[in-house]
Image: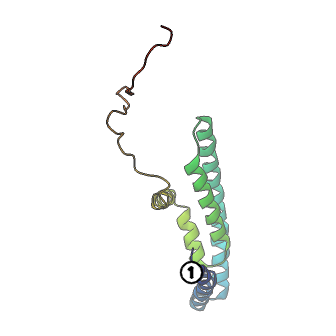
């Protein structure tokens, strides 16, 4: 990541959070704003905990089947990030955290990031002669017996 973009995010996001908190506080009052921030944090942590246990069970089932639970592990990391966003005071970070808690959206974002990063590729048909699920694999070559 470009250092200038990182610095802009590091300084800009907290300032934007403060601006939104001040604007909401001026509309509904200071105490309701603080209470709303606390309620979203508590509700978010509860949701992260429930989905975290669900993801843990999916990991265990995948391991029991002998599969690598790669997507489940990525979802767990996303849930960890969602928990961080929900504990961080502010409405923008709460929105990002709650968006991370929507399973179809979370999976779609992870898959699109993996495809963009060229970590996964679309399945292509095998080349001609390499066999397939219903064709035997043919290897051409020459041989001779040495025991003659």
Whole-percent x, y for residue 30 in the image = 66, 88
User: Residue lying farthest top?
Assistant: 148
Q: Position of residue 93 (x, y in %)?
A: 59, 75
Residue 123 location, x and y as percent?
Answer: 39, 46
Residue depicted at 51% across the width and 57% down the height: 103
User: Residue at point 62% right, 39% down?
Assistant: 63
Residue drawn at (38%, 31%), measured in percent from left and top?
Answer: 133
Front-most of 128 and 113? 128
Q: Residue under circle 1?
A: 5
Q: Which scheme is used to colour this image of the protein?
A: rainbow
Q: Position of residue 15 (x, y in %)?
A: 62, 87
Is 110 situated left or right of 61 in this image?
left
Q: Is residue 9 above or below residue 125?
A: below
Q: Relative to 117, is 141 on the left or the right? A: left
Left or right of residue 64, residue 126 in this image:
left
Give the SS element for disc 1: helix
118 or 61, nearer to the observer:
118
Rendered position, 147 above or below 90: above
Q: Quarter-wise, where is residue 61 in the image?
A: top right
Q: Which residue lies furthest to the left in this view?
A: 128
User: In the rendered image of this protein, does residue 33 appear above or below residue 57?
Assistant: below
Q: In this view, does 135 lie above or below 5?
A: above
Nearest the viewer among 82 and 4 is: 4
| Residue at image point 61% right, 52% down | 73
- Exactly how many numbered labels are in the figure? 1
Q: Quadrant of residue 35?
A: bottom right
Quadrant location, the N terminus = bottom right
User: What is the crowding at mark 1: few (fewer than 14 residues within 10 Å), some, or many (at least 20)?
Assistant: few
């Amino acid at each position: 990541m470009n250092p200038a973009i990182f610095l802009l995010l590091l300084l800009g996001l907290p300032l934007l959070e403060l601006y939104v908190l001040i604007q909401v506080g001026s509309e509904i009052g200071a105490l309701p704003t603080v209470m709303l921030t606390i309620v979203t944090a508590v509700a978010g942590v509860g949701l992260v905990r429930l989905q975290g246990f669900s993801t843990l069970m999916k990991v265990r089932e995948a391991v029991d089947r002998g599969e690598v639970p790669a997507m489940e592990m990525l979802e767990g990391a996303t849930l960890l990030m969602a928990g961080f966003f929900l504990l961080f005071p502010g409405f923008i970070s709460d929105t990002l955290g709650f968006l991370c808690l929507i399973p179809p959206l979370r999976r779609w974002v992870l898959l699109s990031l993996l495809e963009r990063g060229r970590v996964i590729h679309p399945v292509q048909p095998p080349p001609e002669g390499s066999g397939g699920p219903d064709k035997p694999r043919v290897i051409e070559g020459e041989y001779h017996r040495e025991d003659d």
